[in-house]
Image (cartoon, rainbow, N blue to C red):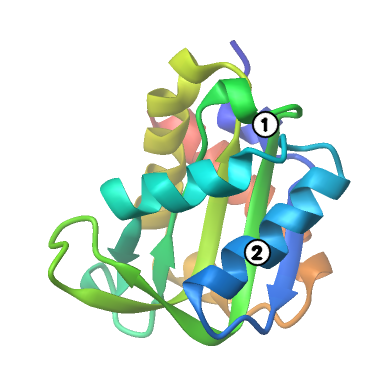
Amino acid sequence: MKGLAEFSTTPLVYFLNTPTQEDFFNVISHELVAQKVMLPAGKAALIAREQTFPSGMQLNQIADRLPNIAIPHLEGDLVQQERLVVVHFEIPVAFKDLADVSRILPVEWAFMLMNPVSKEQPMRIAQLIRALTQSPVAQLQHLFAAKKPSQVIRLLPPLMAEAERKQ
């Protein structure tokens, strides 16, 4: 089984101006279907899964000035291509907090694991969460300060590789 570092060597990175979660799912679903990363039915599945299993996380509990993130994902039967998709929201998008669904978080970044092998999903999500919560704060701040996709593509794989080595 490939580790998350290999999985994320070529992440798809988008900087989007989608003011609502609905707008985000519309835009990202269109992009991922066009790139043959997911099937068209994936959009409805992403929306339904997010309603049932909210994916917002507060990283500012780890360190000040870290943003809120979301980690939406699909079941493998709707995924055509293994990818990590990273989205920076120019305007924070509201997501429910996975730890307290009554709380709405303004999310600045989304990390979407697209994996056609459903049984690997829990391990991959755990690796991603570990990378985003246990990496050195300075490295995380540098990643989240990225202003263009090429910076994210350069900064993210080393964080993933380091998190994998620590497990």
Q: Is residue 134 visible?
A: yes
| Farthest-out residue, bottom | 91
Mark 2 lies on a secondary structure that is helix
Few, some or many residues within 10 Å of mark 2 (<14, 14–19, 20+)? some
Q: What residue type is labelled 1?
A: Phe
Are the residues flagged by discs 1 and 2 in contact, CB closer than 8 Å? no
At x 78% / y 77%, what residue is drawn? 148
Tell which of 68 and 63 is nearer to you: 68
Identify the residue shown where x is 42% and y is 66%. Answer: 69
Percent x, y for residue 47?
Answer: 46, 53
| Residue 6 falls left or right of residue 65 | right
Q: Position of residue 6 (x, y in %)?
A: 69, 29
Q: How far apart are the alpha carbons under marks 1 and 2? A: 25 Å
Picture quadrant where residue 149 is located: bottom right
Quarter of the picture containing the C terminus is top left
Which of pointers 1 and 2 indicates the residue nearer the eye? Answer: 2
The N terminus - image quarter: top right
* Mark 2: amino acid: Asn
Q: Which of 13 and 103 is in front in this view?
A: 103
Closer to the camera in the image, 131 or 70: 70
Instruction: Please say whether residue 53 is visible from this viewpoint.
Output: no
Estimate the x, y position of residue 136 in percent, counting from the top left: 42, 61
Which circle marks residue 26 in the picture?
2
Q: Residues within 10 Å of mark 1 (few under 14, many from 20)?
A: some
- Residue 32 at x, y percent in the picture: 76, 48
Q: How many marks?
A: 2
Secondary structure of the residue carrying numbered label 1:
helix
Please report the residue visible at 59 percent of the width from the left and 20 percent of the height from the top.
77
Residue that numbered label 1 is attached to = 7
Instruction: Give the mark nearest the N terminus, 1 or 2.
Output: 1
Does 56 appear above or below 130? below
